[in-house]
Amino acid sequence: MDLPLVKRSKENPWEDLIDSWAAIQWVLSNSWLLGYVNLERVFLEGDSSGVNIVHNMAMRAGDVANPVNLLGVALIQPYFWEKKGLGHDDPLVNPFAAEAPSLLDLGCTHVLVFITDQDVYRDRGWPYYETLRMSDWRVVEIMEIEGKDHVFHLFSPTSQKALDMIKRLVNDECKLKFLELKAKRNYRFIVFRIEEKIQQVMVERLGEPDESYEDFSACLPPNECRYAVFDLDFTNEENCQKSKIFFIAWSPENSRVRSKMLYARSKDRFKRVGRDSSRIAGN
């Protein structure tokens, strides 16, 4: 198997960006990967100056001339420069430079930004998040770690706050599926169950967009607890088509007491995941 060969030029100060794009193209062009990974769910992650590389790769992925199927990016304590103070205004290292393309041209739908409150570059990460949030970007989140400096996780990888970052980065299928429903409306409903032996929340059922509330109701067991979200389409008083996501806590009267207690303890997690949804208790 031949790795991609990249001709380096000492005259090009941004040759790492050229290497990175060549590597991405090489990976996505090798069909042997299809048996091992899902190329529909590709994420790029970088920390510090690596964030600049990830940002630029995502911008190139959004260019119709260079189509790459990229789902999301994770930007860990961005090392974005600025002309004032840091002395550089090149759009490749300063996404807010006058000549920089709009962040809305990013070629992905999910963006996760990590910052720390003692990082001198903290105020470069916040506007990145705020710009996307104010534009009603599909899925954008930010996590600020208190009491830590730039790339603290590289020096203390086993500290609790570094582990908290890892937990946020690791794919949470329940949360990802909810965010997909919220952003793309590609499911009518999602039913969740708790696997009691391992104390883990699992996705039990994904409802197709053309399924009905009756189909959803039929998925709820008569004597077991469940959590669910349902995307309801309706017409308001002004005769406008609307949709609203409802969070449902399903707790039948004849379900086991232990199960009721377990689901009750886990409810706060789902409130955080579905913070933009209305809530219904069902029994």
Image (cartoon, grey):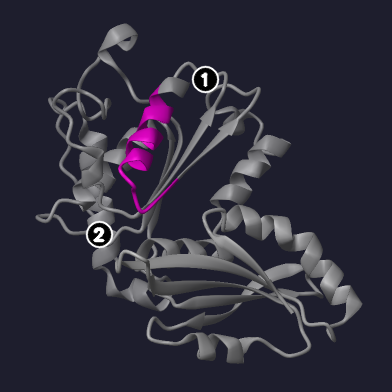
At 68% from the left and 69% from the top, the residue drawn is 201
Quarter of the image that includes the C terminus? bottom right
Bounds of the magenta segment: 124-140
Camera-side residue of 53 and 23: 53
Label placed on residue 26: 2
Q: Amino acid at mark 1?
A: Asp
Q: Provide residue 224's location: percent of width, then percent of height.
A: 77, 84
In the rendered structure, the answer to whether residue 26 lies left or right of residue 148 reads left
Are the residues flagged by discs 1 and 2 in contact, CB closer than 8 Å? no
At 74% from the left and 90% from the top, the residue drawn is 222
Q: Is residue 5 visible?
A: no
Q: Is residue 65 visible?
A: yes
Camera-side residue of 138 and 58: 138
Q: Provide residue 181's location: percent of width, then percent of height.
A: 44, 67
In the rendered structure, the answer to whether residue 59 lies left or right of residue 207 reads left
When the figure is inspected, residue 188 is found, relative to residue 58, above or below; the finding is below
Camera-side residue of 66 and 211: 211
At 38% from the left and 41% from the top, the residue drawn is 133
Q: Provide residue 97's location: percent of width, then percent of height.
A: 21, 23
Dot 1 or dot 2: first in sequence order is 2
Q: In front of the other: label 1 or label 2? A: 1
When the figure is inspected, residue 170 is found, relative to residue 102, above or below; the finding is below
Q: Amino acid at mark 2?
A: Trp
Q: Quadrant of residue 158?
A: top right
